[in-house]
Amino acid sequence: MASKNRDRNHFIKPFLTIPLIPPVISRHHLPKKVEVYEYYTVSDGESKSYKEVDGIPELGKQVILAPSQVSYMNLFINGVLQPKDCYAVQKGEITLKTEDVPPKGAPVILQMLKF
């Protein structure tokens, strides 16, 4: 047993160092400027088309931008995000492609993001 302990003491301890990492030239990417536009209206329970003039004037000027003018759009009806296949947007107008219409008084919100 004594010989095993003596053999263990004769091992050379490893020399550990922290590897040197060459300095990296940092490139700072500033966040892109994002412009958010929103269109708000309320369903009348009959129409599947909403125009800028149907917007809520108390919330300021309501605009519906053309899809080519924005990077991304979301349509919410009664607080529920709608699939892109269920609506079409052109400058100044939203048209629902669904068979049914939103219930009367349901909020219709179009969120438009421009990067």
Image: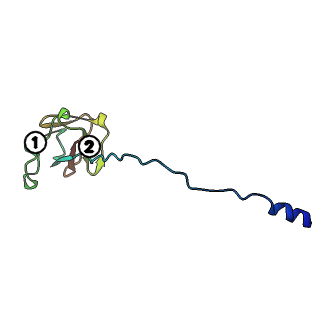
Task: Look at the picture and state if 77 lies above or below 9.
Answer: above
Asked whether, in this view, residue 54 is left or right of residue 76, the answer is left
User: Which mark is first along the chain, 2 or 1?
Assistant: 1
* Camera-side residue of 95 and 34: 34
Q: Which residue is mark 2?
A: 74
Q: Which residue is mark 1?
A: 52
How many numbered discs? 2
At x 75%, y 57%, the residue is 12
Asked whether, in this view, residue 64 is left or right of residue 26, the answer is left
SS at mark 1 in the image: helix
* Camera-side residue of 18 and 10: 10
Disc 1 marks a residue whose amino acid type is: Glu
Residue 67: image location, x then y, percent: 20, 34
Viewport quadrant of the N terminus: bottom right
Q: CA distance from mark 1 to mark 2?
A: 16 Å
Residues packed near mark 2 inside 10 Å, few (<14), some (14 to 19) or many (20 plus) = some
Among all residues in the image, which is located at the extreme bottom?
Answer: 2
At x 11%, y 43%, the residue is 63
Disc 2 marks a residue whose amino acid type is: Asn
